[in-house]
Amino acid sequence: MDKPVKRVAAIHDLSGFGRSSLSVIIPILSTMKVQVCPVPTAVLSTHTGGFEGYSFVDLTDTMEDYIQHWKKLDIDFDCIYSGFLGSPKQIDIVSRFIDLFGNKENLKVIDPVMGDNGQLYSTMNEEMIDKMKKLIKKADIITPNFTEAAYLLDESYDTKMSEEMIKNWLVRLADMGPKIVIITSVPEKECKNTSVIAYDREGKKFWKVSCLYIPAHFPGTGDTFTSVLVGSLLQGDSLPVAMDRSVQFIISAIRASYGFDYPEREGILLERVLENLKLPVLVNSYEILK
Ligand code: PXL
């Protein structure tokens, strides 16, 4: 029997201030009528992007029992979605989680959160990058940003890359295991736009959604993007429509935030735009790349 609502296991941290990870994932997916079951990886007072002196409680040692209890309850998920992970051991735990709860039907989405703007986050290290390269083998979909894609491929961060080179990156990442690779925050060479470019290995298609560059940097937009994408796919949208929906939501959120004078590290004003998720996609702007 079909469940009354779709269910996602969300393996992420809870950061109390700054609008990232579970603080945005839960409201977004709930608004999209998806049940979120969090597996908290760590509790932080704030996210690590732009705040100093944050408190960090690593929940690695609690995760195994937590997961085993779910297994005893025989809970099944329509999607397993992981993001920021706080230690190498947590990457192993996510891998085991996928072995325990993954099946042919459910969607395994890994957002390999590691860095942004050419820089790694302060909690990342080489061992974690290596493990992340292995973890993505188990994913159906990965959503690295441009920086994370470079780290997964051992390439340097070059904002002047041609579209052909980006396509080469997408194919190489898909060769590492995932069926669908979506790179976000791809700088466009010719103009100030940034784009989201995807490759569907089975359909052998490249999709692109571009958006006008807005000179703002709000932490947590990667989590917002992937949450909307997951919600949209679980609602039955196609990949390019889900990409469109996610990009349009991010743009509306940034536009709603940018006019206010407050620190960007506090994230987008999600509360002002959350209801937009209930609207249909009004304008499709995706392109298929040849
Ligand atoms: O949004 C990604 C993210 C998630 N969790 C923590 C972070 C970040 C990015 O800075 O610091 C704790």
Image (cartoon, helix red, strand yellow):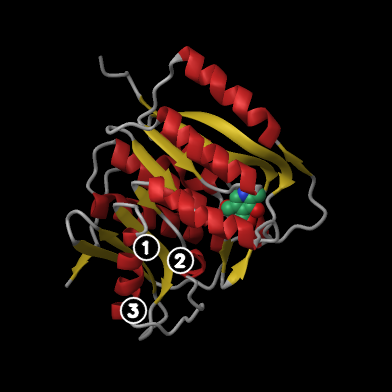
User: Taking the image as drawn, is residue 258 in sight?
Assistant: yes
Sequence-first disc among 3 and 2: 2
- Cα distance in 3D space between marks 1 and 3: 12 Å
Q: Are marks 1 and 2 in contact (CB under 8 Å)?
A: yes
Mark linked to residue 82: none
Image quadrant in which the N terminus is located? top left
Type of amino acid at the residue the image marks with label 1:
Leu
Q: Which residue is mark 2?
A: 149
Query: Residue 39 or 21: which is nearer the viewer?
Result: 39
Q: Which residue is mark 3?
A: 165
Q: Is residue 78 above or below residue 164?
A: above
Identify the element where label 1 is drawn: helix
Sequence-first disc among 1 and 2: 2
- Cα distance in 3D space between marks 3 and 2: 12 Å
Query: Residue 41 or 173: which is nearer the viewer?
Result: 173
Residue 28 lies left or right of residue 64; in this view the side is left
Q: Is residue 116 above or below residue 78?
A: below
Residue 253: percent from left, percent from top? 48, 54
Choose mark 1 or mark 3, whichever is in front.
1
Q: Is residue 165 above or below residue 83?
A: below
Sequence-first disc among 1 and 3: 3
Identify the element where label 2 is drawn: helix
Mark linked to residue 173: 1
Choose mark 1 or mark 2, whichever is in front.
1
Task: Give the image quarter of residue 251.
Answer: bottom left
Query: Residue 47 or 41: which is nearer the viewer?
Result: 41
Residue 161 lies left or right of residue 72; in this view the side is left
